[in-house]
Amino acid sequence: MRTLRNLTPGLALVLALAACGGGAGEEPADPSPGGQGSWRVESLTTGGRTLHAPAAARLDLAEDEAKGNYGCNGFTAKVVPEGGAALTVTPGMSTTMACENQAFEIEFAKLFRGRLTLDRGPDRLTLKTADGSTLAMTSEPAAPDAPLTVTEWTVESLISGESVSSVPAAAADRARFTLAADGTASGSLGCNRFSSKATVDGATVVFGPLTTTRMACQGPQGEVERTLTGLLGSGPLTWKVQGGRLTLTAPDGAGLGAKAGSAAE
């Protein structure tokens, strides 16, 4: 048997890599098995309601640990993966600042513990609890904030203090409004159409008296309409846009959440 004694260092390295590489045609291993990676949290769904994440909410998953941000407070956790199908999370340390999006932070912390199954896509990861609650995430960068004016906003949720409820299915996508650049507002309250003046002053907006059509509205559409009529007529509302989401909040904690549609002409 002959031995190769005079290989150059470069050739020896090539042969060593070839020996370790396996047979021809083998697919490379997944560079990020399971849910490992850096994820931007988009929303969570629990108890029949969906909460949209603050811009800072994120999760960084490593092989045996996780760290992230609930939206304001940071956290760590121990992670035990089960292949690429599930993982078990044991919460570690977290900060305890009082934060604006407290409701989301509380639910995120409740959800991200125990055994979670994984649904992995090319740019997405969804974690699911045993009771069906989900945490939806993406690796894509956050969308730029939509402009408050000239955007058509579709009401998705109604807010009452720390409680957020989705618009009933029978009234979904019916309540829409646009704040025009000329200081007017118009749209639908869920049943009747309306128009009014809208004065934006810094972080607040004030709607003037609403002029509406006169259809009699019953059921979920009527309930949503009455809630929105009261909210828009309640005085100064604090507005906040994050990506394609708008929140309008009254001083008493009542409010609405809306998603951006197309720009109005």
Image (cartoon, rainbow, N blue to C red):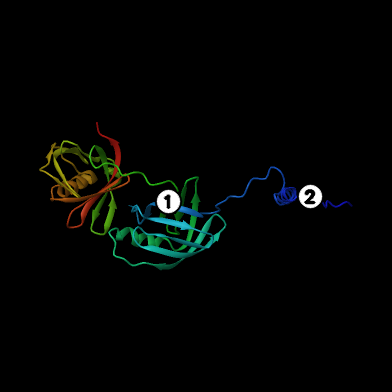
Q: Position of residue 242 (x, y in %)?
A: 30, 48
Residue position marked by numbered label 1 in the rendering: 137
Determine if residue 132 is in view. no
Q: Position of residue 120 (x, y in %)?
A: 50, 49
**Residue at the extreme top:** 265
The one nearer the camera, 14 or 7, is 7
How far from the left and from the top, in percent, is residue 47?
35, 57
Identify the image quadrant of the C terminus.
top left
Image position of 95 with respect to 84: above or below: below
Q: Which residue is mark 2?
A: 7
Q: Amino acid at mark 1?
A: Met
Q: Where is residue 114 shown, x and y percent of the image?
A: 46, 64
Q: Tag 2, which secondary structure?
A: loop
The front one of 100 and 154 is: 100
Q: Residues within 10 Å of mark 2 (few under 14, many from 20)?
A: few
Side (left or right) of 210 relative to 122: left
For residue 179, side relative to residue 134 (left or right): left
| Marks 2, 1: nearer the viewer | 2
Query: Which residue appears at 41% of the width and 54% of the height?
Result: 135
